[in-house]
Image: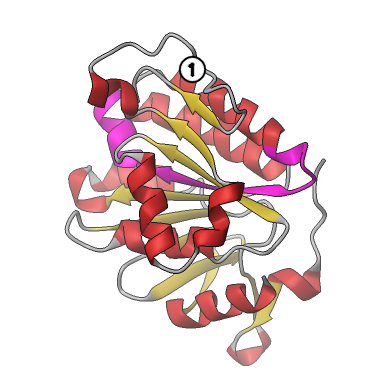
Amino acid sequence: MSRGRDPARSTRELTDGVTVSTFEPGSNVLVRDSSLAGKRGLALALLAALPVDECPVVLSAATDPERLQRRLVDAGNADLGGRWYVIDAVQSRVDGERIACPDGGDRRTWYVASPGDLTGVGMSTSRTLSAVTETGNGPRILVDSLSTLLQYSSSERVYRFLHVCNGRVAAVGGVSIQVTHSDAHAARTVGTLAHLFDVHAGDDETVTVRTGGSSAASLPMGELLSNLTAMA
């Protein structure tokens, strides 16, 4: 079930009367900075600052999902544990075994053999989105990370995957948050992928939000997180 946009819930005013989106349903967020910057922590904060009608989803291609979950608990978000959904493309590499069953058995965990299996990642993502929307909630999905996907597949394949993935998330009124190491890829590659996102967030504590067409506006990350938390 798709969720409609509620202007009172999803927009805020900036200076000069400019209204920008703050993660309204269907938003796609790119968190990018250097390899040493705290992107994952920032992305987790954005994942945790969700309203009550969204469920957290992690598509993990770089970090053990249980480790990410522990970081959310440590940050004081233990209540998210029971609403947690995972697409795990890491565990098979950690165990050194091929995952035979893509369904973890609880409709909350799906396994993919490798981050290079974008078809499997896409299928598991679709199943997860269906499981979340059947609860009447919307998904807020964290993809950790685009840089790992680019290590396994060409930029053209990753672009096509993101185009489809972001479209599926938007179709059900979800929010997509995706992490990339901007200094690990050619500027042209990062720039091309960036066109698929509405919001660009970096470790410089400033968020750039597209306001339509080629125009954009910026606001401090602290204000955005505070606003999102107030909406929850």
In the image, what residue occupies the spot 36% across and 76% down?
Answer: 205
In the image, what residue occupies the spot 33% across and 11% down?
Answer: 98
Give the x, y percent position of residue 221: 44, 76
Residue 154 position (above or below residue 15):
above
Residue 87 position (above or below residue 223):
above
To which residue does mark 1 refer? 119
Name which residue type carries label 1: Thr
Which of the pair 74/127 is nearer the observer? 74
Q: Quadrant of residue 34?
A: bottom left
Q: Quadrant of residue 132?
A: top right
Give the extent of the magenta segment: 132-154
Q: Is residue 154 visible?
A: no
Q: Quadrant of the N terminus?
A: top right
Which of the pair 199/56 is nearer the observer? 56
Relative horizontal placement of residue 162, taking residue 139 as reference (left or right) = left
Give the x, y percent position of residue 167: 63, 38
